[in-house]
Amino acid sequence: MNYSPWQRQIRLIVTQALAEDLAAGDVTTTALISPELEGQGIITVEEEGILAGIEVAEEVFRQVDPGIHFEKLAFDGEKLSPGKAVAQVSGKAASILQAERTALNFLQHLSGIATETRRYVEAVSGTKAKILDTRKTVPGLRLLEKYAVRVGGGQNHRRSLGDGILIKDNHLAALRSQGLGIGEVVKIARQNAPHTLRIEVEVEALEQVEEALRAGADVIMLDNMPLDQMRQAVGLVQGRALIEASGGINLGNVRQVAETGVDFISIGALTHSIRALSFSLSLQASQPGIHI
Amino acid sequence: MNYSPWQRQIRLIVTQALAEDLAAGDVTTTALISPELEGQGIITVEEEGILAGIEVAEEVFRQVDPGIHFEKLAFDGEKLSPGKAVAQVSGKAASILQAERTALNFLQHLSGIATETRRYVEAVSGTKAKILDTRKTVPGLRLLEKYAVRVGGGQNHRRSLGDGILIKDNHLAALRSQGLGIGEVVKIARQNAPHTLRIEVEVEALEQVEEALRAGADVIMLDNMPLDQMRQAVGLVQGRALIEASGGINLGNVRQVAETGVDFISIGALTHSIRALSFSLSLQASQPGIHI
Amino acid sequence: MNYSPWQRQIRLIVTQALAEDLAAGDVTTTALISPELEGQGIITVEEEGILAGIEVAEEVFRQVDPGIHFEKLAFDGEKLSPGKAVAQVSGKAASILQAERTALNFLQHLSGIATETRRYVEAVSGTKAKILDTRKTVPGLRLLEKYAVRVGGGQNHRRSLGDGILIKDNHLAALRSQGLGIGEVVKIARQNAPHTLRIEVEVEALEQVEEALRAGADVIMLDNMPLDQMRQAVGLVQGRALIEASGGINLGNVRQVAETGVDFISIGALTHSIRALSFSLSLQASQPGIHI
Amino acid sequence: MNYSPWQRQIRLIVTQALAEDLAAGDVTTTALISPELEGQGIITVEEEGILAGIEVAEEVFRQVDPGIHFEKLAFDGEKLSPGKAVAQVSGKAASILQAERTALNFLQHLSGIATETRRYVEAVSGTKAKILDTRKTVPGLRLLEKYAVRVGGGQNHRRSLGDGILIKDNHLAALRSQGLGIGEVVKIARQNAPHTLRIEVEVEALEQVEEALRAGADVIMLDNMPLDQMRQAVGLVQGRALIEASGGINLGNVRQVAETGVDFISIGALTHSIRALSFSLSLQASQPGIHI
Amino acid sequence: MNYSPWQRQIRLIVTQALAEDLAAGDVTTTALISPELEGQGIITVEEEGILAGIEVAEEVFRQVDPGIHFEKLAFDGEKLSPGKAVAQVSGKAASILQAERTALNFLQHLSGIATETRRYVEAVSGTKAKILDTRKTVPGLRLLEKYAVRVGGGQNHRRSLGDGILIKDNHLAALRSQGLGIGEVVKIARQNAPHTLRIEVEVEALEQVEEALRAGADVIMLDNMPLDQMRQAVGLVQGRALIEASGGINLGNVRQVAETGVDFISIGALTHSIRALSFSLSLQASQPGIHI
Amino acid sequence: MNYSPWQRQIRLIVTQALAEDLAAGDVTTTALISPELEGQGIITVEEEGILAGIEVAEEVFRQVDPGIHFEKLAFDGEKLSPGKAVAQVSGKAASILQAERTALNFLQHLSGIATETRRYVEAVSGTKAKILDTRKTVPGLRLLEKYAVRVGGGQNHRRSLGDGILIKDNHLAALRSQGLGIGEVVKIARQNAPHTLRIEVEVEALEQVEEALRAGADVIMLDNMPLDQMRQAVGLVQGRALIEASGGINLGNVRQVAETGVDFISIGALTHSIRALSFSLSLQASQPGIHI
């Protein structure tokens, strides 16, 4: 989180989120609340979970009003009990009211992701398997969602199509029509890809594993494979490549998948089907003054 | 969907989503797929639900490659059975591969919202209650999420803080410290608000209902009220104002809430805790050519 | 003026105005004035009027050179006598010269609007009528022009097509061709509009007033109506709706209009045909140094 | 008007103007007008004047809905009689309603400028004096306002601080404190300025004219000078430099100024204090269809 | 060149380049050339070289005036003889004059890079060494410069810090102060880096080669190593990793470097110290019409 | 360098350059360097030259991490000996590593230009000729490149097509087809051009010089003229206009050109064919801490 383009993007995402809510002003607060009125708000979590996005919430308040003082009472990655206060904000009451919803919207979404990720990470603890996310993210929030996965203890798979070779079923289908099998495809990838990248290939059957290995694949993704086939694949590979399991994996079966000996388990639902973690803000005015 | 700023925003959202995935190129496709290779892809839904976002998906393909032909096979609002093809795309295989994930990410998220909204709408059918969304949206996607709610048969509450007066608990708390009760607050709002807007106020107890009415409230929001109190509130109001129920409402109890006689029921989970509807794209190359 | 999107837009408007004047540099100042030369400028009004935009002028100097010290000597809404100094700026002489024209351009335009608005407000003082602006603004400056109207004592009508229902002649004409009268149109609006908005409708004849009322109109706009008809309309409505007078109203007749008993009077010329209020900046260099 | 950056800026200005009016949608039209309803609108001028901005109005309709057909019935620079139709638009009725106000706002402002400019140009006809604008423009619209001046028959002075040397009173005051007189300042300008630019200097008294000439000034601006002094200045200069009259010039005295023999007369009010030329749009629906 | 973000960036780069030249208009052409005048221009290369950027030049003309017809007479990668016409443009003479310089600026810079790259590629022909560029590019043009390197027959090293692990001297220096040697650093990189990336490490001495290999480095960069040490390094590695030579390599010694058996040779001067390839545009007016 | 639009553009150019390198993060530094690790870097020049761009380099570090302390050890325009340290940076080691390449890329390019410019300036010292740049700049960097020319002691010709009249061969060719000679073209330019600009015209033969003079040209550009013809042209003009020599001028012949008595010599290679001046950054970690 320490280099500029990251922070620049966070600022931009927050700016756009605020524009959704505030571009036409806040007619209620303008009608009711004196600009001089000061207040204090407490942001509280309403259920158990893992906090993620506290600095994004802080950025929301900063953009609405640089005069707001935002004090963190909990940190990203922290396990929260229901009722735990995660931040205290103080300053203009109007500003707090205008930042409230947008800040909570970030917190509830990102903490929802971190919380679910943590469940998967704990489910496989003690095995060597690492939990990965996918590119099945909510459009516009990939950067933050992948951050929330890391906060939850997961690792990130590719951030984009530009930073890893992953030969998928549709690539194989397209090249099969040219008469090329998986081994030949892996070799072409190796020849044409930047020399800085490994080659990962998706397989659906055991026969493909050996062919991919011989062609020099560095990572093999087992797509929607039954547990016993996964185990066979691990036995076959014998450490000559890394193995990733993917498809149809949930909290009910992730431990069994991990125990087959795979290196990585990737879960689309970590980012595409998340229940928000519930937060609320409670405001108290701390100083007289009323709007005429 | 017919005026320019809407389409401009959709284009911008799609551009940003594509930037997340493609700004650094697509190293796999570049290494493997000849730019001349043509192909055809079918986008299929994998479970039952309501389609939303098909034109957003089309925009994704258009931005990746204006030469892609995108044929809609289903329309927003249509009820889909598992396996139903919703669109067929044809053109450069590389372009199809590069648009695939981003297009599916929009479809799965928006259709998830429309599908869940439809469940609520059907649950209250036959009552006068209308299902509303809230401002608890995923940052950056509010415009599209509110569209998906309409596709599912719901209605939109405020799009932003600028287009409706809604006096909430935190406004009342701030002004209570100034010695003002709910009736006085409603009157101030009426005096200061633009003359084009109605006044809606959130109440937590029956006593507040009559006070708000006397002060001239146009809409009363019952926050987290038990069913029997809701019924009493409806009896009390007798059509002198509109009534909105909010808080803690789910598919299990929404019918009972509707049957109390409220005019609107607002549901945050319609946008903040949605399970994606599953879609996939299957590609077939239709013409020879291979990358050297 | 205390939430972020407002200030963000002001900053943007100022940035664009400066780009018009300074994007290619300032060849005169660069050729003549040493970057080290310090100076002090006084901004003075040359005629009587109401000040508006002093913080926009401050923002102009801030953007040109954050090192400039800008001291306000008058405040928005203040009545100015000719020769009154409204601000004093000190810092680099070059920076003052480069900000001068753009700052004065904002001041003269916005103060012109506030001054004219004040004349109308004073003309109707003692009546219940409030002076409203319209959407007939100079493209790009609506936000600031509507602010200047408020500074002058007026109220804002709709800021945009998105924050109020106003059924105008062209809407009625379009629907008349479908066989719909004003009453039916008002009812459709009521049914389809967001529940947070009132319904305002423009009428040109007394017959339409009663029909609109019966259909549930909340506000009735009398368009270009003679004074006696206005009086009759007020009598007819008897407080069942708010009344707005519009069209052909000027300083010569606005008092008579107000005395008919209407609630609002809207004036397009407040923003579309304004005479600038004259300001000038006088510079004194305060420190030696000359450009080679 | 034929190179890209010009059109790009026009597009941007129109986009921003539309954003002011339409960013939050058009709640009235959405509630009332079926997206299928077709219509035809006529834009008519309501008073005599010179048309300017017809292509900007066209761009407004194009951005709102590329499907709108916009037919020009008059051209920029044309003298209009009251009631003259300047354009006919046809297409979706909703789109016409959404573009109406923004298009008229451009037309009324730019035609107001062209009309006033034409009055000045005609007032000096037969003399050699050319009418110039100034940099006293409405922030954000300088490009278009300077275009409208040309349409009215005027010429443009500097577009910005970057494309002409103009030594003004404040430059002279700043350098006087360094002990430098007008002649020395002109020489420094000549030495430091880009070799592609002439040197213009503002003088307030006849004594300065000769000094400026001797120092090599190419253009001399007479600031707020009485008519007889202007005549003397013209006699003094004898064609050795161009002469511009500026300050306090209006339709009542501009002919006398021109007859002193000056080359240019610059008028701030051409852009800062313009009365809008009145236009209206009248819509007729041409095809059945009604919104549910 | 077939996916959207690439083209979007090219459009943006061209837009910005045109803004540099045309944002304030073209005063010469406006003063002289009738907007109706048609013309034809031929773009000719004046010395031998490799063409790169012809589509960028086309984009320049397209943005200045979509009505210009641009016909390519040569293609990127083609070897050009002096006097060879590479494109013919026809349309408005004014538009051709306004696009000329910017189009030529792109062509001369990119073709300069492709031409120099080709010289290196030919110098090592017959060896297995591939010519790579570096991140020493001209700010703002990296995308295009890396494209020109490919056109010249070279390969791209990392496009950014985000798509490859390259442990450089400064990383090693920073970690040496923590007591970590090259082998330990490589291991940490392997453990923490995304599983999709290879590990490349820069070494300055033969002792480090073996240590890096043992730690699992996939690619070894020999920095500024004498030829005989390079040969020893190649012998030492024996195919267990790829080898890149870097530093101090020029056309005079690149063949010798290639013959040591290294896999890659990276050359900063391909992008940071390029002599432009000379192009000119010759215009002929083809139709009467003259500016008043 | 003291007004805002200049700095705004520098910031933008730096932002875009950083985006090229850092938009996808820095995978190497993230994998290896603890965010807590502090360090110190020295930027050193490796060969003799003139420094330009030190404040741009500072801006790079500022944008990457505002916490970095950047101390200038040399200033723009200073003559550097090999090994001279030009800046010292201290702060987070990770931030220094991420800013390094982009900062050096600016320094090496701009200092390359200033160094080459200085060589030309020294070559003509003692003559009255001034060294000018041209519009043959690297797209996107014109502002900075023209700044570097000034740092090197040169002067800037036109910054864009908007700030100077320069009638070139292609303008003359286009108008020749209309039957107009150089004298007539100069007269048309004088009549139509803004009154603030001089008229410069390119001539290729001595016959044209007198014709241009008679028509009132202020500056005459001798294009690719042999030395003896230049001398004749100077004799012919006798101070009635300024003279610029252009085309085919290099360090070998620039002194002879200057000695012909021309006022300006313009050199395209100052910006289009520059060898980068070599800089490096050496990092030392100054504080314990290691990444897990």
Image (cartoon, coloured by chain):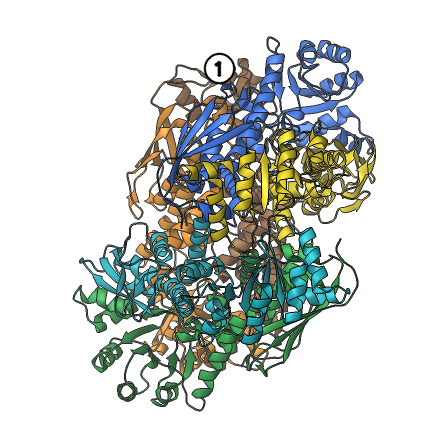
Chain colours: A brown, B orange, C green, D cyan, E blue, F yellow
Whole-percent x, y for residue D83 in the image? 25, 68
- For label 1, the SS is helix
Is residue A83 something that shows in the picture? no
Chain to which the residue tagged by mark 1 belongs: A
* Residue F158 or residue B42, whichever sits in front: F158
Query: Between residues C292 and F59, which one lies in front from this camera angle?
Result: C292
Q: Is residue A41 above or below residue C21?
A: below
How many marks the image carries: the answer is 1
Q: Quadrant of residue D93?
A: bottom left
Q: Residue A270, how many percent across, how many down?
A: 52, 41
Q: Tag 1: Cα neighbours inside 10 Å, few (<14), some, or many (≥20)?
A: many
Q: Is residue D91 above or below residue E288?
A: below
Could you tell me residue C26's position as x and y percent? 63, 56
Residue F188's place in the image compared with C168, above or below, is: above
- Can I make out residue C193 in this image? yes
Horizontal relation, residue B3 to residue F243: left or right: left
Q: Residue furthest left?
A: C179
Q: Residue drawn at (56%, 29%), measured in percent from left and top?
A: E108
Identity of the residue drawn at 77% across and 64% down: D178
- In the image, B149 versus C95, the foreground residue is C95
Q: Is residue B187 left or right of residue B256?
A: right
Q: Which residue is mark 1?
A: A183
| Residue type indicated by callout 1 | Gly
Residue A121, given in percent of the width and then of the height, sits at 59, 38
